[in-house]
């Protein structure tokens, strides 16, 4: 830091010749003349560095100690500037460069969206564009507060959004809303109906009449606990209540996966062709124009945006397309291995369907053989609460 | 000249009551030690900081007595500090501290008193 500061301020390198160099150094130090990098070159001769301000004060010191002081070199930024003082075009170029950088940096060159899971990128981009945020827009025109409001109104799924402009990049961070379950207010009469098919295992009604018993098979939408309570004595008169309770039922989730015996594997041969192209202001320039000549191949596309630091993205992109040659190999897999893998796949698929609040109580693995091909099927038996409130008379 | 004369004085003083100095500490020093005050400030002692054998910083020094590329003598409140080495350069010097760089072989206190 010290060195850089000295370079920025400019300093001189001097040669001091005399019998009392120590004395010269001491007096300089006492008079607060900044001095550094003092080297004895040979007897009675030393070189040292000194600030420009110090150099102006050196004459009386030199006279007092009987040393001869010679200027060897002037270094530092002020001297460099001095040297190029007359070169107008150079300064004009430097100024132009600064203006250009500033001008280019006042546009948005990339929009970064994060936090979206169910909302698709294209939907987000479209919505942002409608609110004036897209690449190529003048960044001082963007009103982030208004864009936030616009986005919240436009996309119902949004729970929270933040839009930040950093350099030439817009950072959009969102959180998605979970769909709210319909809650029937306490004072409104309702039934409890089945959310899905299942076999009833337990019904506990806190309020209302149990409409099903243990062991009953219920269909989705069927009334489990009725809010219609018949009046005592009366034939068809009834009182409407807000039914409450839990209805546990057995449910099944099933998934299948094929057992693959001759598995095609794609092996990379190690040969590839890379095609580079340059994108300037969203116009693609293919630099080398290499054609793909492989039969079986996969393509990997790598886009690199040129940026200064992380946030100052420049309108220059470098795209590398890699064609990787592949060989398809049919590997023989033993029946056991293939079956095991298929079962594992089916199990994973089935487990994905099981809701969080359900407990898996049993797992049944089966293999279905059908015209030569085998399919693994995994059924998961669960116990879960299938009750859901529904207004009486409403929908 | 002032540097030389003070050096002479100290040498003669140290020669006379060498033993006494070791046994008996001055009242001021004892006082400072009791209160755990920083000695370099109160007693005008130098503070030496070395990084390996290549850098040495001496704070609170008095002056440079001798300087060549392999020998450096620095006047301090604890006598003369003699540094012997190769390629010694004074990297920085201000009125309070001095930083010496190079390969340092020995560091010696001459006429400590």
Image (tube, rainbow, N blue to C red):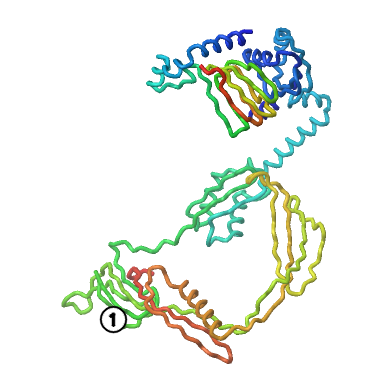
The image position of residue A8, as x and y in percent, is 70, 27
Crowding at dot 1, Cα within 10 Å, few <14 / some 14-19 / many 20+, comes out as few
Q: Is residue A377 above or below residue A39?
A: below
Where's residue A17, x and y in %? 76, 16
In this view, A81 is above or below B65: below
Residue at (47% x, 54% y) in the render? A159
Q: Which residue lies furthest to the bottom in this view?
A: A371
**Considering only vertical position in the picture, is A209 above or below B35?**
below
> Looking at the image, can residue A137 be seen?
no
Which residue corresponds to the image point at 28% horizontal and 70% vertical from the top-left?
Answer: A245
Work out whether residue B20 or residue A265 is closer to the camera in this orientation and state it: B20
Which quadrant holds residue A312?
Answer: top right
Q: Which residue is drawn at 81% across and 66% down?
A: A291
On the image, numbered disc 1 is attached to which residue?
A: A214
Q: What element carries label 1?
A: loop
User: Where is residue A197 shown, x and y percent of the image?
Assistant: 39, 78
Residue furthest to the left in view is A233
Of residues A306 and A187, the one nearer the viewer is: A306
Where in the figure is residue A4, as x and y percent of width and height? 67, 30
Chain at tag 1: A
Relative depth, front residue between A321 and A179: A321
Instruction: Please tell me how many numbered marks the rendered image carries.
Output: 1
Q: Quadrant of residue A218?
A: bottom left
Residue A287 visible, this angle: yes
Quadrant the N terminus of chain B occupies: top right
Task: Judge left or right: residue A273 versus residue A133.
Answer: right
């Amino acid at each position: 830091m010290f060195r850089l500061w000295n370079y920025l301020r400019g300093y001189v390198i001097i040669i001091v010749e005399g019998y009392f160099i120590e004395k010269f150094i001491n007096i300089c130090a006492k008079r607060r003349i900044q001095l550094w990098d003092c080297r004895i070159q040979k007897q009675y001769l030393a070189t040292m560095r000194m600030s420009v301000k110090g150099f102006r004060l050196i004459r009386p010191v030199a006279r007092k100690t009987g040393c001869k002081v010679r200027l060897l070199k002037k270094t530092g930024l002020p001297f460099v500037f001095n040297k190029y003082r007359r070169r107008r075009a150079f300064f004009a170029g430097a100024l132009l460069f600064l203006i250009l950088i500033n001008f280019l940096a006042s546009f948005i060159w990339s929009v970064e969206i994060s936090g979206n899971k169910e909302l698709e990128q294209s939907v987000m981009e479209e919505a942002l564009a409608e609110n004036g945020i897209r690449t190529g827009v003048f960044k001082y025109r963007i009103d982030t507060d208004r864009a936030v409001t616009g986005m919240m109104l436009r996309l119902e799924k949004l729970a929270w959004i933040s839009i930040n402009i950093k350099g030439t990049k817009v950072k959009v961070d969102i959180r998605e809303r979970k769909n709210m379950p319909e809650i029937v207010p306490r004072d409104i009469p309702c039934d409890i109906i089945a959310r899905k098919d299942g076999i009833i295992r337990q019904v506990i009604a806190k309020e209302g009449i149990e409409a099903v018993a243990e062991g009953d098979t219920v269909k989705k939408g069927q009334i489990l606990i009725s809010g219609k309570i018949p009046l005592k004595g009366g034939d068809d008169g009834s009182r409407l209540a807000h039914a409450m309770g839990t209805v546990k039922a057995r449910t099944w989730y099933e998934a299948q996966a094929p057992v693959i015996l001759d598995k095609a594997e794609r092996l990379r041969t190690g040969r590839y062709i890379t095609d580079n192209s340059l994108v300037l202001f969203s116009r693609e320039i293919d630099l080398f124009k290499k054609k793909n000549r492989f039969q079986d191949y996969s393509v990997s596309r790598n886009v690199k945006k040129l940026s200064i630091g992380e946030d100052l993205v420049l309108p220059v992109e470098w795209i590398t397309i890699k064609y990787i040659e592949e060989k398809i190999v049919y590997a023989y897999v033993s029946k056991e291995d293939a079956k095991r893998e298929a079962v594992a796949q089916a199990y994973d698929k089935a487990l994905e369907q099981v809701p969080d609040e359900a407990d898996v109580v049993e797992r049944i693995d089966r293999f279905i053989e059908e015209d030569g091909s085998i399919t693994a099927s995994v059924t998961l038996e669960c116990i879960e609460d299938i009750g859901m409130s529904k207004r009486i008379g409403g929908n | 000249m002032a540097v030389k004369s003070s050096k002479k004085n100290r040498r003669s003083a140290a020669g006379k009551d060498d033993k006494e100095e070791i046994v008996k500490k001055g009242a001021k020093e004892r006082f400072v030690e009791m209160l755990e005050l920083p000695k370099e400030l109160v007693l005008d002692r130098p503070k030496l900081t070395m990084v390996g054998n290549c850098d040495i910083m001496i704070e609170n020094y008095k002056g440079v007595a001798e300087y060549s590329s392999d020998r450096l003598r620095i006047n301090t409140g604890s006598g003369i500090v003699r540094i012997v080495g190769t390629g010694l350069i004074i990297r920085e010097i201000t009125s309070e501290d001095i930083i010496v760089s190079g390969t340092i072989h020995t560091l010696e206190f001459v006429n400590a008193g």
